[in-house]
Amino acid sequence: MAIDLISRKAWGARSPRGSHTRLDSTKGVKVHYTGGRVDPRIVDEHDRCTALVRSIQNSHMDGNGWIDIGYSFVACPHKKVFEGRGLNRLPAANGSGLNRGHYAVLGLVGNAGLLEPPDGMLHAILDAIDHTRQNGRAGDEIKGHRDGYATDCPGGPLYAWVRRGAPRPDGGGNGTPEPPGAPPFPGRLLKYPPVTRGDDVRTWQAKMAEREWEIDVDGAYGPQSRDVCRRFQRQQKIDDDGVVGPVTWRRTWEAPQG
Ligand SMILES: [Zn+2]
Ligand SMILES: [Zn+2]
């Protein structure tokens, strides 16, 4: 599948403080983690991923004194890839002397909080890697930051995955397995107010209509959708907040029809 790339403009990146150094090609990619605590709630709300990426850029520019975020790309649990420095630009995250060799791709897990990369994040890391190979003259290597540098980065779970050859998850496996038939969670909460609009809303409404709920399939999550959602949540004996999050989304496809 095509990469779901979030441009610097779209995530609100600051302008670099100087010019990037040109990088013509690399041997491949090094995989990183944040090294700090990652709030597990990013899994429920993609907006939190965006806020985290901005804060990482701030700390690299204001704390480390770098001209920009140090990573080439950042992968989040929602199978989305944030453009960091991007293609053909020297990263800063691999350590002195090691940045010409590899692009730097960060997975948003840490050494506390969110430890295990969800499948969506592994897909996103691989999408970023494919992107560097196809468009940024990256070679085949997939390594961890700790390869050739004294660090525990990218942490146990991500490093174990790298050592296994960085396989693409098949939907099962660890992390957040999707039940058969459930499309991937859209990565944002469907809620009201204000009205949430989009194809993800339409997809959810269509499935609810198929389950014989009285609901307009119009792609607009307003009071009617919220009320249907609440009644469905009560039926499912889950928190009836009237918001379609990952649990409600999954149940919409997974729950036996009563
Ligand atoms: Zn690292
Ligand atoms: Zn995200």
Image (tube, rainbow, N blue to C red):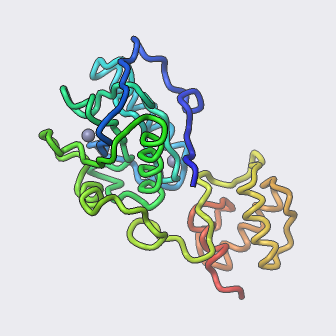
Q: Horizontal and vertical percent for residue 197? A: 77, 49
Q: Between 142 and 241, which is closer to the camera in this rendering?
A: 142
Residue at 86% over, 72% down: 214
Residue at 14% over, 41% down: 148
* Quarter-of-image position of residue 225: bottom right
Q: Horizontal and vertical percent for residue 104? A: 33, 37
Q: Horizontal and vertical percent for residue 146? A: 18, 45
For the question of whether residue 209 can be seen, the reply is: yes
Q: Residue furthest bottom?
A: 258
Residue at 18% over, 27% down: 97
Query: Number of labelled discs?
Result: 0
Q: Residue furthest top?
A: 18
- For this view, does 196 lie left or right of residue 100? right
Q: Horizontal and vertical percent for residue 5? A: 55, 41
Q: Is the C terminus in the top left, top right, bottom left or bottom right quadrant? A: bottom right
Residue at 44% over, 61% down: 119
For the question of whether residue 58 can be seen, the reply is: no
Q: Between 240 and 27, which is closer to the camera in this rendering?
A: 27
Q: Is the N terminus in the top left, top right, bottom left or bottom right quadrant? A: bottom right
